[in-house]
Amino acid sequence: MEMRSPLGRVRGLGSAKDGVAHWWAQRVTAVALVPLTLWFVVSVVSLVGADYAAYKAWVGMQGNLVLLVLLIVILFHHTQLGLQVVIEDYVHGEAAKVVSLMVIKFTVVLLGASCVLAVLRVSFGT
Amino acid sequence: MKSGNRPLSPFLMYRPQFTSILSITHRLTGIALAAGTLLFTYWLTSASYGPEAFARAQALIGSVFGRLLLFGWTLALFYHLCNGIRHLAWDAGWGFELPRLKATGWVVIVVSITLTFLSWAAGYAVRGGA
């Protein structure tokens, strides 16, 4: 016997009332991070011991800047999604859970915005 | 909270196995990498404060302590990357048979260690050449 209402079935949100949005976003960001991470490791290796001028020249290149901004945004999004699951699994008090989830979200947005602005400043600065 | 005679989670019933250790390591490396974003942020933002601040960040990361941390993060990164691809394969419905599960687990371990050492060899080559 089908226990779900037709509306509930169409919405497909399940008991968490969230559907597969979180799960899917984690996968999409993971796939995007595979090439971005490999590119980043190669870049960091090329910047070992670099001075400011060398770093500025690197981040001043359009392709590097685009990939770096994408990496920052997607990396912090993926970090937030992952830490959220960890908190939901181990933090059981409702208040502690809501507060820690908020702290993680705010921290991630703060760090991500700081990184993007720093990278743009160096890239566009004189 | 009294839990009474309720069912136990699997991690309370089973002794650790190869697959379960790989699984918890994926989560632990994820948490470690999340902490690593603080260094990532420090490195990128230091440059926006000018050449001296960036030189300080580069010196800190290049110190013995900095390199130790970075080596650990490199290993964690490659493990999480390789095992993440393993997870994506499972999501696509591939690789659930026990022999394949164990084989891909070993591939993840060997490849992540290899990539870590290759990156560090390349890093030292760049540093030596400069």
Image: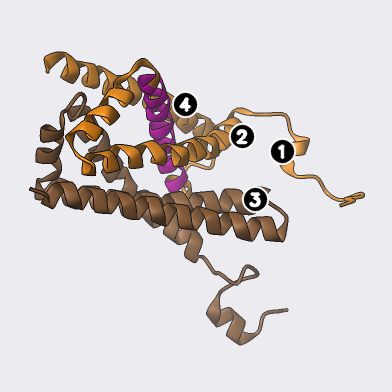
Point out residue B130 in the picture as x, y percentages from the top left corner: 12, 18
Q: Which residue is mark 4?
A: B106
Q: Return the mark for residue B32.
A: none
Report the residue at 42% width, 36% height from top.
B36
Q: Main secondary structure of the magenta part?
A: helix
Which amino acid type corresponds to the residue marked 4 in the rendered image? Answer: Trp
CA gap, disc 4 to disc 1?
A: 22 Å
Which amino acid type corresponds to the residue marked 2 in the rendered image? Answer: Ser
For label 4, the SS is: helix
Instruction: Left or right? Give the position of B116 relative to A1.
Output: left
Report the residue at 16% width, 46% height from top.
A122
Binning the other alpha carbons within 10 Å of mark 3 as few (below 14), some (14 to 19) or many (20 upward) gives few
For label 3, the SS is: helix
Q: Return the mark for residue A89.
A: 3
Q: Is residue B75 magenta?
A: yes
Of marks 4 and 3, the one in the foreground = 3
Of marks 4 and 2, the one in the foreground = 2
Colour assigned to chain A in the rendering is brown
Which amino acid type corresponds to the residue marked 1 in the rendered image? Answer: Phe
Chain under label 3? A
Q: Return the mark for residue B11.
A: 1
CA gap, disc 3 to disc 2?
A: 16 Å
Q: From which residue to which does the magenta span run?
A: B66-88
Binning the other alpha carbons within 10 Å of mark 4 as few (below 14), some (14 to 19) or many (20 upward) gives some
